[in-house]
Image (cartoon, grey):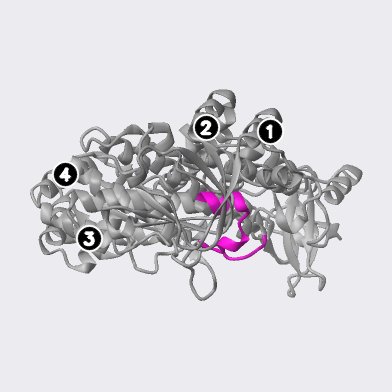
Amino acid sequence: MTAIHSSQLSFFARHAPFDRMERPHLLWMLERMQLAYYAKGEVIASPQQGEATRFFVIKQGMVRGTRIANTPQDAVLELHEGECFPVGALLGRRAVTSEYRAEEDAFCFELPAQHFHELIELSVVFKDFCTRRIAALFEQSTQAMQAQLSHASTEQQSLSSTLASIIRRAPVSCRPGTAIRSALQQMRDAHLGSMIVTDDAQRPVGIFTLKDLLDRVVLANLSIDQPIGNVMSREPITLPPGALAYEAAMVMAREGFRHVLVTEPDGTLRGLVSERDLFSLQRVGLRQLSASLRQAGSVATLISLSKDIRELTHNMMAQGVAAEQVTQLISTLNDLLTSRIIELECIAVGLQQPNSKNGFCWLALGSEGRLEQTFYTDQDNGIIFSVPAGETADAVRQRLLPLAMRINEALAGCGFPLCSGGIMASNPKWCLSLEEWQKTFSEWIDNGSPEDLLNASIFFDFRSLHGNASLAAALRAWLTKKISGVPRFLHQMAANALRNRPPLGVIRDFVVGQQQTLDIKLNGTTPFVDAARILSLASGSAATNTVQRLRDIAVPLRIGDTEIEGWIEAFYFLQTVRLLHQYECSARGEAMNNQIDPEQLNDLDRRILKEAFRQSRKMQSRLALEYRL
């Protein structure tokens, strides 16, 4: 048996899956391993050698795998320190399908195939890694991410939070000369239990609460037309934005108050923190939030609740909820918020609710249509409507456009920026009758220009969000039939999708931009989204969610479950990295984006990021094979 040096144990302790193996199993493996040297350019394993005889773990250097007789985009496989190969060939007791060659002088630990198979039966961790390779790595990485989020979430929700971080809404205030009647109307419209009274410089001079109304106005039999300055509580207690939540809690407990004002160093009003604000984040739950969204009486209330959506979904990630569920949860809650906005705005303009036979349907497009929204997303929406007898489509459109503008602006107030490309229901181009949508889609499919392909990648992911869902169902059925008769268009979509290659480098691990970052959305999740869309449209699936699309294509396209699950796990990982990055941007007070620096990731996450991009290459190879590209 080989003597084991402490440096060997230290090496394997840094790399998955060996870092999680039980020590006796790791020692058993090391006792049977040999260290081999390969000069630059030397072949380590190739298909010509027959059935794979050794399990390799790279100790130093880089190994390049070149796929034999395959598509160019799948030709190169780079392996670095701590990575192992050829797991698939050993499990299948077959030859490797790639030629593995030392790209530079390399040292590899080698385990004979016989001991490899013995180790699989000995170590549950090793077996799990080998048989569920990407899933096992993904789970290990996700656990680490969740631990990181859990720590941040606990700190954020604790009484050690700053008051600035828990202010729920912009302050509503009035001047001392404002009539009580007018102030009460403002409080009612904004669903507030108090009114802050400020001077002309926006410095608080008092606060008026419902308790003041009872004690100083109603029971005192005073007119509500007198100035609010006569009955307000003067010299309200204030704290700076940097004060901690527990300080506010102490003030409230000591003085018997339910509110504390937050003021800037110059005395101007920053906001108000209530007793409910201090503790609601720790108690907010999905059922409570859903009920609040459905019952919200104003857009102002929904703006406040939109912050709860973000906080709840942050907490869900910290509690171990997977990226698939988090993105669907975000989308579902955002659906409820959007639906309530539509209902409130319909009431505000006196328009009939869009659920009747002659109503309209609000369409979710893009990531919202796929139920894959993250923390950072703008608006992509449209309207599909029916045309009542005796009316024209243009007349209905002119009636709906002002309403759509109100809805888009309300959504912007809730944290969903207006789409810079104008893909919104308030744009006359995307507020169309069923027949007009069919005509528009027909033109894209029949012409197939670059702009048509881009539009298809957004609009073909539509789903009904609110209103007359039968209109969206009719459009989906029509689209499925139409596109099946024009295979040329799917071929064009496939060729266009294959232009976006996974950013795996030949010299370095990843291809990055000038800022040394890569776009985890464009270069990471989008190739999966695009391929799943094309293959599902080809197979007649009506699904819009990427993961559901991938599962739907398995049987009709005869793709093995293992391959499908590998793609899904890779997509989940990229979504998780994206969510975590956006969360961290938000926690630092920075604008959220999708630009990540691979060098800032730990070794495990860099390793699985490479594996996820390799899965993307494999999926694109399948797409290229289907369309002979």
Residue 287 percent location from the top left of the image:
55, 32
Q: Label 1, on which residue?
A: 27
Check disc 4: other Cα within 10 Å, few if <14, some if 14-19, many if 20+. some
Q: Which residues are magenta?
A: 588-608
Residue 530 appears anywhere in the view: yes
Q: CA distance from mark 1 to mark 2?
A: 14 Å
Of circles 4 and 3, which is in front? 3
Name the kind of residue labelled 1 in the image. Answer: Leu
Q: Label 2, on which residue?
A: 116
Residue 550 included in the magenta stretch of the image:
no
Check disc 3: other Cα within 10 Å, few if <14, some if 14-19, many if 20+. some
Q: Residue furthest top?
A: 121
Given residues 378 and 209, the one toward you in this image is 378
The residue at 49%/63% (across/down) is: 40
Given residues 297 and 286, the one toward you in this image is 286
Given residues 369 and 353, the one toward you in this image is 369
